[in-house]
């Protein structure tokens, strides 16, 4: 053995940073959160809504009681001592957020339902969201599902084509000669700008949307895959060639794995394009999905429904990005210090 | 570090003695923007089977280019290189290069890096025991599942050596393989390199700009001129192995080599 040998990697993991060594018996931040939510509940129930010229906001009482219930649960956990410790241990990190959320909801409730300072049809109180989800969950979930399917088909096909095109461009001089100018000229066009034209060329608005989402995803994937393949350290090829590697081995076992970090950057960028294209396509032509739901709700001047749909959209898209990062972390587990989402 | 018993690497086929390399009047030039740039100028050199030869020369003199030609990564502009009498036209697993940078594939574990050659040639199933034996030979069997970024410089270069010897090369081409290591690791690795060479019996062609290293390792040291590189001197080093770094014979040879490079004032 000599001086450079490290401890085996299994044992090399750094000890995790701990919170305070002995957590106190009660959870102060949890108590603060409980107070905030209790205030929200009491206020919602005790202060009558401001009359705004139509029937009262639905679910005001329910919203108040749920807030109180949450406050009670938080209070019990905060003061629960050892019995609550396992749950508190998990929640501890969210304490400040729980508190701020309670205060935020409180302000929201006061300025909309109670004082009516924010103009009413455009700004709805929190309980109206509950109303939307309870009364319209079927249409909303249907829209979310349709958006997700469209997104999946579009991103899947776009990423696959973009990846293949990128590898071809990176590997073959001729492919690069022919494809690069096309991508360079057509790539920067926002796919949404192509929407009005494409509706004429495709049999259905759905296939138009798939095509445009695929383009939006495929362009950055192709460019970044290409740059990934083209910038692979030449020595990797030298090493593989002296070891007897065939061309196929050089492409599939050297170039592509080496380009994967770039490919994921391309996918991440492509998702942004895909989301934008999806929503606009659904607003303009496709007869389902969250984008369609937004325009539909707007037609009825039903602003709470729009907020409800936007929230679903935020969770959905964020979920898709989280999925991408999870896959990325698995595929690129060999890298150190990857970007966190 | 190099363990003494490792049956799997003592190839069942009588280990081919080291390669016989003949470099015949080889010249090479690069096409630069300002016209052709000659880097190697009429070099002739024989490496006998099992011999350890070092090329010593100033930075950027074209030593590494000469190695690339010998490895078959590029064809020479003029002259030819014979490997056991056969002209070298392309890379071959019997002539493995170990670069200054270990060039481990970062997405592969240590074991998969060592297995690269057999996998590339489709012989991995048969050679799996050799992979394990090579890992053991360089003392990294406990790190088989580690990724390259978890290794120190010396360990990474050992993996590169294991990846080379698993293919049972008849010529090991060493392009300043210890150049980036700290000086203590470097001393250890020099000894390990010698042990590997003595065990496996390959021919070795080492490029270095470290005079001490050249004479500690090689049986013959070829001193090259500035670019385009030409052979300035050939110094035979008959000191027996294991060598001692303080051996006065080595000191005398170092002095001669530095004199050829015009750097003997301080020795």
Image (spheres, coloured by chain):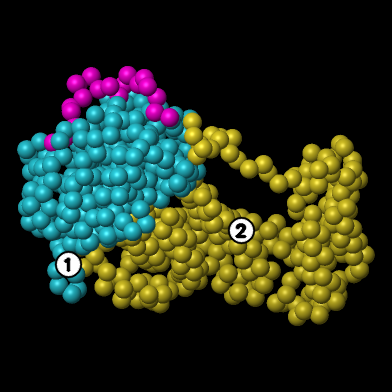
Chain colours: A yellow, B cyan
Q: Quadrant of the C terminus of chain A?
A: bottom right
From mark 2 to mark 1, how far is it between C-alphas?
61 Å
Magenta span has B18?
yes
Are labels 2 and 1 assigned to the same chain? no
The subunit carrying tag 2 is A
The span picked out in magenta is B1-20
Up-down relation of residue A336 to residue A82 (above or below): below
Give the percent coordinates (x, y) of residue B173.
25, 43
Quadrant of residue B192 within the rendered picture: top left
- Where does label 1 land, which residue? B37
Q: How many numbered markers are drawn?
A: 2
| Secondary structure under the numbered disc 2 in the rendered image | helix
Give the percent coordinates (x, y) of residue A174.
18, 63
- Where does label 2 land, which residue? A315
Quadrant of residue B11 within the rendered picture: top left
Q: Nearer the viewer, mark 2 or mark 1?
A: 1
| Secondary structure under the numbered disc 1 in the rendered image | strand
The structure residue drawn at horizontal position 21% and vertical position 62%, both measured from the top left corner, is B227
């Amino acid at each position: 053995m000599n001086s450079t040998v490290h401890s085996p990697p299994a044992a090399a993991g750094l000890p995790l940073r701990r919170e305070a060594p002995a957590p106190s018996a009660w959870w102060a931040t949890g108590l603060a959160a409980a107070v905030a939510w209790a205030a929200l509940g009491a206020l919602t129930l005790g202060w009558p809504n401001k009359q705004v010229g139509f029937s009262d906001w639905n679910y005001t009482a329910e919203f108040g009681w749920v807030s109180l219930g949450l406050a009670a649960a938080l209070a019990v956990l905060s003061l629960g001592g050892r019995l609550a410790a396992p749950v508190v241990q998990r929640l501890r990190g969210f304490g400040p957020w729980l508190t701020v959320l309670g205060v935020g909801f409180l302000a929201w409730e006061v300025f909309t339902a109670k004082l009516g300072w924010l103009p009413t049809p455009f700004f709805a109180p929190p309980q109206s969201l509950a109303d939307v989800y309870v009364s319209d969950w079927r249409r909303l979930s249907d829209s979310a599902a349709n958006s997700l399917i469209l997104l999946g088909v579009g991103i899947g096909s776009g990423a696959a084509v973009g990846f293949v095109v990128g590898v071809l461009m990176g590997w073959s001089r001729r492919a690069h000669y022919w494809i690069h100018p096309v991508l360079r000229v057509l790539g920067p066009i926002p796919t949404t700008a192509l929407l009005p034209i494409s509706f004429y060329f495709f049999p259905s608005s759905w296939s138009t949307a798939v095509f445009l989402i695929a383009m939006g995803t495929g362009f950055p994937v192709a460019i970044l895959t290409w740059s990934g393949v083209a910038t692979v350290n030449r020595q990797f090829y030298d090493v593989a060639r002296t070891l007897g590697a065939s061309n196929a081995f050089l492409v599939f076992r050297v170039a592509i794995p080496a380009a994967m970090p770039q490919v994921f950057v391309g996918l991440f960028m492509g998702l942004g394009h895909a989301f934008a294209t999806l929503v606009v396509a659904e607003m303009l032509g496709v007869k389902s999905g969250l984008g369609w739901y937004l325009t539909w709700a707007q037609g009825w001047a039903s602003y709470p429904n729009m907020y409800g749909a936007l929230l679903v959209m935020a969770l959905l898209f964020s979920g898709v990005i989280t999925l991408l990062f999870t896959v990325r972390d698995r595929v690129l587990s060999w890298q150190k210090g990857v970007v966190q989402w | 570090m190099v363990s003494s018993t490792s049956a799997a690497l003592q190839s069942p086929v009588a280990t081919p003695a080291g390669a016989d390399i003949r470099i015949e009047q080889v010249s090479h030039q690069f096409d630069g923007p300002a016209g052709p740039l000659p880097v190697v100028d009429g070099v002739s050199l024989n490496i006998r089977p099992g011999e350890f030869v070092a090329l010593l020369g100033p930075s950027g003199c074209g030593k590494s280019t000469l190695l690339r030609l010998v490895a078959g990564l590029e064809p020479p502009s003029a002259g030819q290189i014979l490997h056991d009498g056969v002209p070298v036209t392309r890379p071959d697993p019997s002539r493995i290069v170990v670069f200054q940078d270990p060039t481990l594939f970062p997405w592969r574990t240590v074991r998969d890096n060592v297995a690269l050659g057999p996998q590339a040639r489709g012989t991995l199933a048969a050679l799996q025991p050799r992979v394990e034996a090579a890992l053991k030979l360089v003392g990294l069997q406990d790190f088989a599942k580690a990724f390259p970024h978890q290794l120190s410089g010396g360990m990474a270069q050992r993996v590169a050596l294991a990846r080379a010897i698993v293919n049972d090369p008849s010529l090991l081409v060493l392009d300043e393989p210890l150049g980036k290591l700290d000086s203590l690791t470097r001393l250890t690795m020099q000894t390990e390199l010698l042990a590997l060479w003595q065990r496996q019996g390959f021919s070795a062609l080492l490029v270095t700009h470290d005079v001490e290293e050249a004479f500690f390792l090689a049986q013959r040291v070829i001193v090259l001129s500035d670019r385009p590189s030409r052979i300035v001197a050939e110094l035979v080093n008959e000191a027996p192995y294991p060598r001692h770094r303080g051996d006065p014979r080595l000191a005398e040879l170092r002095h001669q080599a530095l004199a050829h490079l015009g750097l003997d004032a301080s020795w």
